[in-house]
Image (cartoon, rainbow, N blue to C red):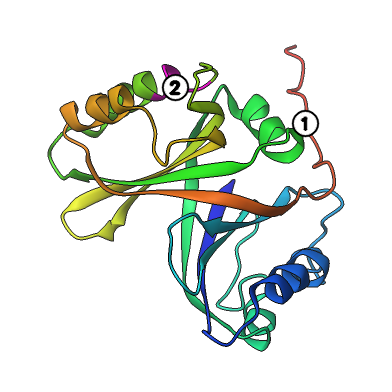
Amino acid sequence: MRNLTICDVELHASTEVEAFEQAMVEDVLPHAGDELQNPESTLFVRSLYRSTADEFPPRYRCIVDSTWVTDNGFFRMRDKIRDLGADPRKIRFRLMFDSLPDKDAALAVLRTRPYRGMVMLDIHLPFGAGEPQFEEALLAALQDEVGVATRVNNVYAAFWTRDDEAVFGSTEYLVIAIGDFMRPALRGDTLEQITAASGEVVESQLYHLVHLVPGADPTPDPAPAPEL
């Protein structure tokens, strides 16, 4: 089962930003993972993003897209991040629910297409509001955004997760849209469709891509056995 593992990272005020990012790019991200896991045949994409918010020190979000499950060591990166003068926060594990343009195309965009940013939405849907109807509306809203070139935002792919236990009284949807952004949000029409379907956007944050390690090409799913 494919999943996203997300860890927010806060730098100490005394930590040098350039040195932190260089170490993450050259050492921490490339050498993530457990020795017993096999990156040669398993999806294991590691990416680091920096918040575009005007704040000091900057905030980072590290995301692993994989079929593996980690412990609190965050794929053996947590202690290394601490050693660099930063505080890794609570790890969030979310099962992948759906993606656009489709599963394979979205993964190809993530791993191989140059892009500069990510918008991440945290959406809460109250229990009883109707998950199937909301998910249809969410899909329709994102279909109008993904692949539609504008002067301000170009979204190449989108991924989202669903969790019924992360937020009391609500289903939480995390939406990740990757592309090139001049405006720190998805289009107003997209957000209005989500709100009209009873989803509450509690956070919308633009991040700049610092670095991505795509990992080796994962082993494709086996072809179905021929019918006799």
Q: Give residue 16's position: percent from left, percent from top.
A: 65, 79
| Residue labelled with disc 2 | 145
Whether residue 76 is visible: no
User: Which residue sits at x=54%, y=52%?
Assistant: 4
| Residue labelled with disc 1 | 222
Does the magenta segment cover residue 145?
yes
Q: Mark 1 or mark 2: which comes first in sequence?
A: 2
Q: Quadrant of the C terminus?
A: top right
Does residue 195 lie above or below 40 as drawn? above
Residue range in magenta is 142-146
**Mark 1 falls on what kind of element?**
loop
Using residue 71 as the reference point, say whether residue 184 is left or right of it. left
User: Which residue sits at x=81%, y=40%?
Assistant: 219
- Three-letter code, disc 2: Glu
Q: CA distance from mark 1 to mark 2?
A: 32 Å
Magenta span: chief secondary structure: loop
- Classify mark 1: residues with Cα within 10 Å, few (<14), some (14-19) or many (20+): few
Q: Give residue 173's position: percent from left, percent from top.
A: 35, 44
- Three-letter code, disc 1: Pro
Q: Where on the picture, by quarter, is residue 80?
A: bottom right
**Mark 2 falls on what kind of element?**
loop
Give the foreground label among 1 and 2.
2
Query: Is 180 in front, or is 227?
Result: 180
- Classify mark 2: residues with Cα within 10 Å, few (<14), some (14-19) or many (20+): many
